[in-house]
Image (cartoon, grey):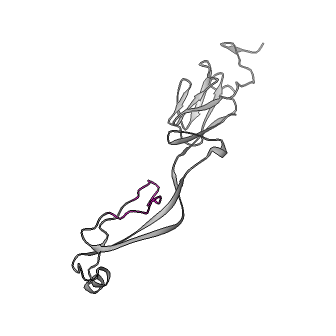
Amino acid sequence: MIPTLAGFNMGLSSPAAPILSYTAQGQFTITNYNASLTYAVIGATRSGNLLTGVSNGATITAAYASGAPVSNTSTMNVLAHARVLYGGATGVTSTGCGPRDNLCCPSGLILDTNGTVCGGAPGSFIADPNQAAAFCGGACNDNCWQLTIACYNWYWTNYTSSGYTLIGNIWGKATNG
């Protein structure tokens, strides 16, 4: 006779792998959860059937008891929803008398992956009176500034074709063992 615990086979078999579903931003749910099983989680925090604080590549297995054979591994993948800069930078330069306003990228372009569109005021002071006269036309020889910013085209990440689902600002995908 094969020993059992709470009706489970304690022989050489292992339980089915935890079946995961991405259900909230950065959160997975074990859809075949069984409170009688022992779960081993790496890279996430489990409370009942919920897995939170998930890092990319987090794993979970199940067993009938500690030390018993474990199920196949299920994996949780998470990726940030982020802006991606592409193409060469478009330089935007402004030279003139101070005080200088904030210099902004043309419509649709951004400075960085945070989506910043303006920055850098007032720029660099042109201390050389000869350069200041050349750049500012003599109108502000003692208060001439120049600023150049790099502006980029951009797009949002999209991992749909790789099986990910976007919830909030986090893409999630379960690979069930």
3 relative position to 31: left or right = right
Report the label total.
0
- Residue closest to the eye, 38 or 111: 111
Which residue corresponds to the image point at 59% horizontal and 48% vertical from the top-left? 158
Which residue corresponds to the image point at 27% horizontal and 84% vertical from the top-left? 133
> Per the image, is 104 magenta?
yes
Q: Residue furthest right?
A: 1
Q: Magenta residues, as a range?
A: 102-117
Figure quadrant of the C terminus: top right
Q: Position of residue 78 (x, y in %)?
A: 56, 42
Up/down of 165 relative to 98, above or below: above
- Residue closest to the eye, 119 or 12: 119
Q: Quadrant of residue 112?
A: bottom left
Up/down of 160 relative to 46, above or below: below
Up/down of 46 relative to 124, above or below: above
Q: Residue furthest bottom?
A: 130
> Per the image, is 41 magenta?
no
Tell me the chief SS of the magenta region: loop
Q: Position of residue 46 (x, y in %)?
A: 53, 29
Q: Position of residue 124 (x, y in %)?
A: 31, 73
Which residue corresponds to the image point at 65% horizontal and 25% vertical from the top-left? 63
Up/down of 66 relative to 41, above or below: above
Which residue corresponds to the image point at 67% horizontal and 25% vertical from the top-left? 68
Q: Quadrant of residue 141?
A: bottom left
Q: Quadrant of residue 15?
A: top right
4 relative position to 30: left or right = right
Q: Residue furthest left?
A: 142
- Residue closest to the eye, 114 or 18: 114
Figure quadrant of the N terminus: top right
